[in-house]
Image (cartoon, grey):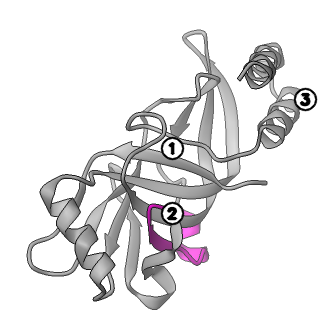
Amino acid sequence: MKIERRCFQFDVRADGDSPTIAGHAAVFGQEASIAGLFFERIEPGTFRKAIERDDVRALWNHNPDYVLGRNKAGTLRLSEDEKGLAVQITPPDTQWARDLMVSIKRGDVTQMSFGFIVTDAAWEKKDGKNVRVIRGVQLFDVSPVTFAAYEGTDVSVRSSADVLGELDSAAAHEPHAESLTVIRERFEFMRRNS
């Protein structure tokens, strides 16, 4: 399985004079269109196990060369609140991290993203839309990002083979298999014609 990434445009800030970056890397209960193929909603509790279990890094733009913090080191604090996945980062005292803090304070960087693999999800049909409801993830990173590939909502770096495999697997086990088959055909058409 490939790591997926989702980006949200809101609530990234550099707090006061203290070297802290805080915000939310994911929000609960909002439906996002995933590349026009299906919708996705993150449920409260999705990150609970991951926060306790996973070794998560805070990266700048998902770049592993720029580590802002790490939960196992105590420089990244993760929690779930009523809004979503809350993040507090104590960045290193490096020039690139100070430059990032300036960009956040100026409002040039306003988005966060998270990298994950889905471990618990279900499909539902809602108002004629296919919705993947995420209930559990393996969490790899949270990142302030310059911009999202899909304006302010989401981006995916999965290969097309991974997407097709997930759709095939879901179609074999879901009551809305005919809808997932249509999504698969649409995805294949888009892939062939892009």
* Residue in view at x 51 percent, y 46 percent: 6
**Identity of the residue drawn at 59% across and 28% down:** 35
Q: Is residue 129 above or below residue 133?
A: above
> Considering depth in this image, is 133 or 92 the residue closer to the camera?
92
Q: Are marks 2 and 3 in contact (CB under 8 Å)?
A: no
Residue topped by disc 1: 43
Q: Quadrant of the N terminus?
A: bottom right
Q: Residue under circle 3?
A: 172
Residue depth check, mark 2 versus mark 3: number of the one nearer the observer:
2
Q: Is residue 86 above or below residue 70?
A: above
Q: Quadrant of the C terminus?
A: top right
Who is closer to the viewer here, 183 or 53? 183
Name the residue tied to disc 2.
Answer: 62
Q: Earlier in the sequence, mark 2 or mark 3?
A: 2
Kindly identify the amino acid type of the residue bearing the numbered disc 1: Glu
Residue 23 percent coordinates (x, y): 29, 59
Residue at 56%, 58% (x, y): give it: 115
Tell me the distance, in whole angstroms, between the alpha carbons under discs 2 and 3.
33 Å
Bounds of the magenta segment: 48-62
